[in-house]
Image (tube, rainbow, N blue to C red):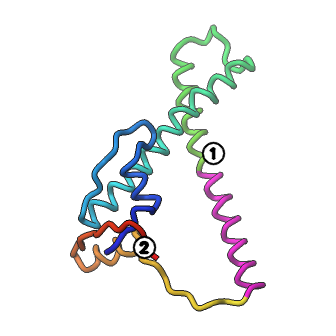
Amino acid sequence: MKISKNSWHYKMLTEKFFFADRWNPSRSLCLYFWQVMFRLAMGVFICMVVASPLVFLMVNVNGYLPETLGVAVAIWALLGTFILAICGMILILLFLTGVMYLVEKLKSRYFPKKEYTPKESLIINYIKAKTDKVCPIIEFKEDLK
């Protein structure tokens, strides 16, 4: 499989991403796929860790959590805001997915279809490799067209 060095997942692994060090991307498709998934999960987790105390502070500033309730309630409230942040991110992703789906539907309806040659997809090639029980070697190219 050939992967462009300009692809977003290659750049995510080789450049600084969410204050993490650069990684050397694996030459095996299976390991490369899991490196990308781990980096994405790490980015989502860091966003939630940052967003959760901010939401907690906004709720606390409005006087929702009085100081007399103690530290235990504050910890539970922080956990609740963390869960709220997760739900908010899921809702935003669902909304964006719906908007993208509608745009694609409108595009396919009002614009004529051109002949399409699909690119190699990281996820599709990973699924094919898993079903074949073989992990192909990845070749990194400067620019694929």
Q: Is residue 103 magenta?
A: yes
Q: Position of residue 23 (x, y in %)?
A: 31, 48
Q: Is residue 35 above or below residue 65?
A: below
Q: Residue furthest top?
A: 68
Q: Main secondary structure of the magenta part?
A: helix
- Out of 96 and 64, give the one closest to the viewer: 96
Q: Quadrant of the N terminus?
A: bottom left
The quarter of the displayed image where residue 78 is located: top right
- Out of 95 and 143, give the one closest to the viewer: 143
Label drawn at residue 144: 2
**Number of residues whose C-alpha sits closer than 10 Å to that of mark 1, classed few (under 14), some (14–19) or many (20 or more):** few
Label drawn at residue 11: none
User: Going 28% across and 69% down the picture, which residue do you hit?
Assistant: 138
Q: Is residue 130 above or below residue 50?
A: below
Q: Residue furthest right?
A: 110
The quarter of the displayed image where residue 18 is located: top left
Q: CA distance from mark 2 to mark 1?
A: 37 Å
**Number of residues whose C-alpha sits closer than 10 Å to that of mark 2, classed few (under 14), some (14–19) or many (20 or more):** few
Magenta segment range? 90-111
**Residue matched to label 1:** 88
Q: Position of residue 121 (x, y in %)?
A: 43, 73
User: Going 66% across and 18% down the picture, which residue do you hit?
Assistant: 65
Q: Is residue 76 magenta?
A: no
